[in-house]
Amino acid sequence: MTAKTAEPMDLTPQEHPETPAPQAPAGASDAPAVAARDALLDKFDIDELQNCMHCGFCLPACPTYRQTGLETYSPRGRIALMKGVAQEKLSLDAEFEKNMYACLGCRACETACPSGVAYGKLIETAREVVEDNKKRLDKRSLTRRLVFKHMFPHPKRIRAFGTALWMAQASGLQKIADKTGLIRILPREMAEMQRAVDKVASPAKRKERPPTLRSEGEPVLKIGFFKGCIMDEMFFETNQATARLLSKAGCDVVFVEDQACCGALHAHSGEKSGAAGLAKRNIEAFERADVDFVVNNAGGCGAALKDYGHWFAHDPEWRDRAAAFVAKVRDANELLVELPPLTFHKPLNARVTYQDSCHLAHGQGVRNQPRQLIRSIPGVELAEMSHPDSCCGSAGIYNITNFDMSMDILDDKMEDVQRTKARIIVTANPGCLLQMREGIMRAGLQGQMEAMHIMDLLDRAL
Amino acid sequence: MLTEGLRQQLIPIVGQKWFLDSPNELHAYSYDATPLLQSTPDAVAIPGSVQEVAAILRLANERRIPVIPRGSGTNLAGGTIPVQGGIVLNMNRFNQIYEIDEKNLTATLGPGVTTADLHTAVEAVGLFYPPDPGSMRISTVGGNVAQGAGGMRGLKYGVTKDYVMGLEYVLPTGEVLRCGGKNVKDVAGYDLTRLMVGSEGTLGVITEITVKLLPFPATKRTLVVYCRNLVDAARIVERIIAARIIPATIEFLDQATMKVVDDFAKLGLPLDMASMLLIEQDGAEAQVVEDIGKIADIARQAGAAQVRTAATMEEGAKLLTARRSALSALSRLRPTTILEDATVPRAKLAEMVEEIERIARKYNLQICTFGHAGDGNLHPTCMTDERNHEEIARVEQAFEEIFLAAIRFGGTITGEHGVGMAKSKYLHLKVGEGGIELMERLKAAFDPNNILNPGKVFAGQNRRRIVVNQP
């Protein structure tokens, strides 16, 4: 029995010579003296933190732990740090911030955890605490504010971003784009990733899209298509392909008006209130559209949409509406395997491998459906990687914020890919798709290997 | 805290990258998988070579700084808690398998190789390393050796100590020594290899390990036996062994565990049964089929209420789900899960389980018991909440009674987790005062300044409050 020779760990704050007591925030001179507990720390869910029994079973599942071998880069370590901050044994400081943002948020640890710890929610809360703390210290970076406050919440601005990207590409001026200043304001990392971006659809083509794509046969379902903000700009054609597949499978596909970004990137980055605002817009928009299902094709967005219930769990006004919305959310893969099988006319004759989207596999538990769809394509052979559900390192904006770690993870992933001898890497999320394209370029495999969204693969075989 | 001078001497040894001492870093090495215990080290060093290990030890020995060797920190006995501060020596950069010798059937590897990686590597060439502790996906072989880890295959194949043939280790003086090797027969002097196994990092730092390998068994089959009472289950285990059949695994779940597992994994277990046994046999196809048939007959004759045999390996894996989900199911019930490993001779299994049930009732606690029936190694598991100090006090009393009962039945206080901090108070029950004194003299011969993992194994007089890590 463990508590025999030593006293049980005392949960009240202890004096630790190495860990100074958290300071009252600088610049907040009107804050009460150090003695009072910082109310911000009450945001941590102590009960959930306590559910981690630090067994370490999450360590081998964690890509950043596998890269570094360091406990601070493991889910168990991060939870211990959160607990340390919540219990005022550690300061809410830059080191803690760095450690919270070193997490990919892939949630592979949740699959490995015997105790069922909701790690995804814990890390979101930790980042929220970090951001709230910085807000009151007014230390947040300009780029960050620009992106989260002034870009994602505004579909028109994302559209403008898409148009600018298209112009750069359409005019064949990729190199000049570097000099236009558009690329200049993006960090080095973003510029690097930019080379993986698809040909962006022209503004005219995007305007052509009818508000509803009718079912090819007798409609069995009316579905509302969740376009996704990045998805609809950078991967317009993939959205079109998804809609085509759904219409062939008997759905009326409605491109619901006034929908917004899902809020995932906000939530993962500690911008809870921004995320909630976007969620409300989506709930309202899809309520008005009166559809049977809300369908999306991006694992990351889907996991966030399915999380709305939790976001509004303590909001009596929105709780039920959020729950009703969540009940309708489906990934396109989930829905397609339930619908009458698609008829394929063009065998693809290719060996492919499937890179799980973390938020589809670990976040939504959707693993078999995409594989089932891939295997249903004539001529396609699915060769599995040894760790297909290990994160590729894309992780939302992680490949921009933690570029070096992301690339190390990607290089390992590409080794795993190459062992499968596959010609096509199939993904189910835009971030993963860009990352895998970057991986192909880094491995010097352009022309020999391609990365595709699963919906484009299915569409190609129709 | 380390003096700045000492810091400046340590950093060049491992390099800045592998020397950690920021507040977050120290906090992240203040715990292992043991509930309730935590203490912050003064530094973490992650050496990359034997020379670096020797240099750190030499310096620490001169300055009398504690050194706590550590792998992945998954032990359940508080074995790697830096209870007196000092330097955590994380050995996970020693993660290379140097050689798989198919002629001598040995593997030589660094202590930081994970147990599962060793399995994968040797199985790729048709060989078999049987020890399979529950944490094998992340536990290191070095940690397994240091703690004397067990697993599910103990009955037929033995445990870690039965597979360690040779070691390289470093003493606090920085001397690098070797013991054992690839020889099956080797009686040159004292068996220091056996002494190092299970020494919990208190005698030396292991830097290389040579293990014995076996041919990988051709096939395996599983069967499940449900019993209306505990005595039937125990009798079945005894009769199987008496019939000269040694299954690879005989796992046991009591009714309380079955209920929790069924609730969690929805397996449709017959919950009116008092216990279930999961039995696995491996080996050559014909032999395995014959053994499983005989075991099923014995179980029926010995009073089993229900016997189910899996026709394929996949079906067998499904049957094992109940056992594999045990920890997940139990640990979701309450925030704190305390898993112990009191062990009794096989023949005392039923009595021991009944005794645990009685003790749980007496202290009004939820204790479920599952474990390795084949080798008498039980895992009475208590679901509690470390914030409830009154309940934790009862948990301590209950486990004390459980340990005393195990000793009374001719068993031991720990079958496979080690003594560490968690059971040092009870060590004398098993080895006697004389045994402890001799062990302390051995310890002094290896580590006269008591810098290696101090505060472990021996309760000693300098027990201190765990949260205070520095004088």
Image: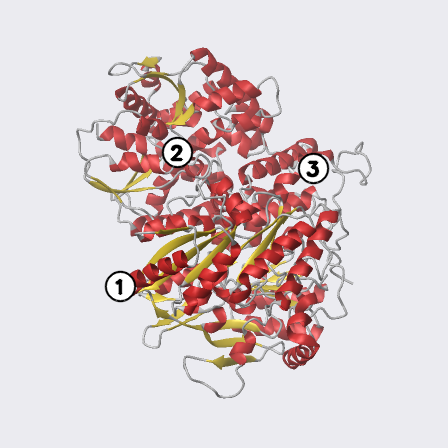
A307 above or below B364? above
Q: In the displayed structure, does residue B299 sit left or right of residue A275?
A: left
- Quarter the C terminus of chain B occupies: bottom right
Colouring of the image: secondary structure
Label 3: element kind: helix
Discs 2, 1: same chain:
no
**Residue type marked 3:** Leu
Image coordinates of residue A271 in percent, x first then y, are 58, 30
Dividing the picture into quadrants, the one containing residue B355 is bottom right
Q: In the displayed structure, does residue A286 sit left or right of residue B20?
A: left
**Residue type marked 2:** Asn
Q: Residues within 10 Å of mark 2 (few under 14, many from 20)?
A: many
Image coordinates of residue B379 in percent, x first then y, are 56, 57
Q: Nearer the viewer, mark 3 or mark 1?
A: 1
A313 vs B22, nearest the viewer: A313
Residue B286 badge: 1
Residue A429 badge: 2
Discs 3, 2: same chain:
yes
Query: Counting residues from the N terminus, which is met first, the one under dot 3 or under dot 2?
Result: 3
Residue drawn where x is 35% and y is 77% of the image: B104
Residue A41 badge: 3
Report how far apart the C-alphas of labels 3 and 1 lie in the structure: 63 Å
A457 above or below B12? above
**Residue type marked 1:** Ala
Image coordinates of residue A269 in percent, x first then y, are 55, 34
Label 1: element kind: helix
Chain ID for label 3? A
